[in-house]
Image (cartoon, helix red, strand yellow):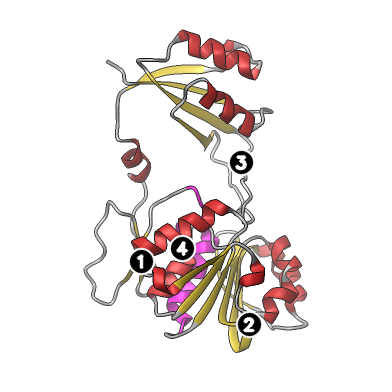
Amino acid sequence: MSAWLALSLDLNDLDPAVAEEACFDAGAVSVTLSDAADDAILEPKPGEVRLWPQTVLKALFPAETAGPATLVELAAALQLPMERIRAEHVRNRVWEREWLKDFHAMRFGRRLWIVPSHETPPADPAAVAVRLDPGLAFGTGTHPSTALCLTWLDAHLAAGSGVIDYGCGSGVLALAAAKLGATRVDGYDIDPQALIATADNAAANGVAGHIFIHETAATLPTTADVVLANILAGTLIELAADLSARVRPGGHLVLAGILKQQVHEVRAAYSPWLDLKVFAERDDWAALAS
């Protein structure tokens, strides 16, 4: 017997937050959003949620309590014809494992690895492994701009450095920095979920004593040896004076989330303070460092 009733619909012009709330009100135990057409999505600003041009919502309901009446209720709540909502009975599964099965260990540079919990870290004694599963906060190393920052850290971070991760997301860059020998890493994000994820991931990796979480940029250290900001070009330009001032003399500023065609504009914004150069590119993305 099926354990779940899955209801799905194309969001189109529906507000995703309203649709999600309607699903939970109707008894859903989980709601996910996915891409219907394999469209690219730009890396979000801290706290921002970006969706694909064609987004599919899928809600899971317990089969023993859900049925045709659930579909009717959801259609009425969203003011949609019932034909727009697709219903499917699915067997019981360990859904966390379903989510993780396509996420595998990845290497960045010579020694840095991001390893999900269901895989074994590499046996190489020189390997530096960060344990990280996909979660609600952005950043597992799969996005090109995150990968570029991880590669920079593997190649350039000096042991004993102080690091600021501005817009920390899941904390992947902060975790990598701490694992690679940073003495202190200060992470900031405007998204409360990102701060929770960073703290949880730091504890899981045994580096909680080296990572400090900030709810506001005002409490960050005045300066650091390395300042990382993997956001978006527009936000990086707005923060040019602030981020430049946070870099200690002789330190490094690493910027990512920049499309190749935006490099000149970002470099120009920082030129009064720092000479940034492209250190690597991947797909349509570039990363800059001083």
Circle on res. 247: 2
189 with respect to 143 (left or right): right
Q: Is residue 198 above or below residue 280?
A: above
- Bounds of the magenta segment: 136-158
The amino acid type, in three-letter code, at marker 1 is Trp
**Where residue 107 sits: x, y (%)?**
37, 65
Which is more N-terminal, label 4 or label 1? Answer: 1
Residue at disc 4, secondary structure: helix
**Residues at discs 4 and 3 in contact (Cβ within 8 Å):** no
The amino acid type, in three-letter code, at marker 3 is Leu
**Residues at discs 1 and 4 in contact (Cβ within 8 Å):** no
The amino acid type, in three-letter code, at marker 4 is Val
Q: Residues within 10 Å of mark 3 (few under 14, many from 20)?
A: some
- Which numbered disc, 4 or 3, marks the residue closer to the eye? 4
Circle on res. 113: 1
- Which numbered disc, 2 or 3, marks the residue closer to the eye? 2
Instruction: Answer yes or no: is residue 267 visible.
Output: no
**Where residue 255 sits: x, y (%)?**
61, 70
- Which numbered disc, 1 or 4, marks the residue closer to the eye? 4
Circle on res. 51: 3
Residue at 40% across, 72% down: 209
Residue at 51% across, 69% down: 149
Q: Which residue is mark 4?
A: 172
**Residues at discs 1 and 2 in contact (Cβ within 8 Å):** no
**Residues at discs 1 and 3 in contact (Cβ within 8 Å):** no
The amino acid type, in three-letter code, at marker 2 is Val
The quarter of the image holding the C terminus is bottom right
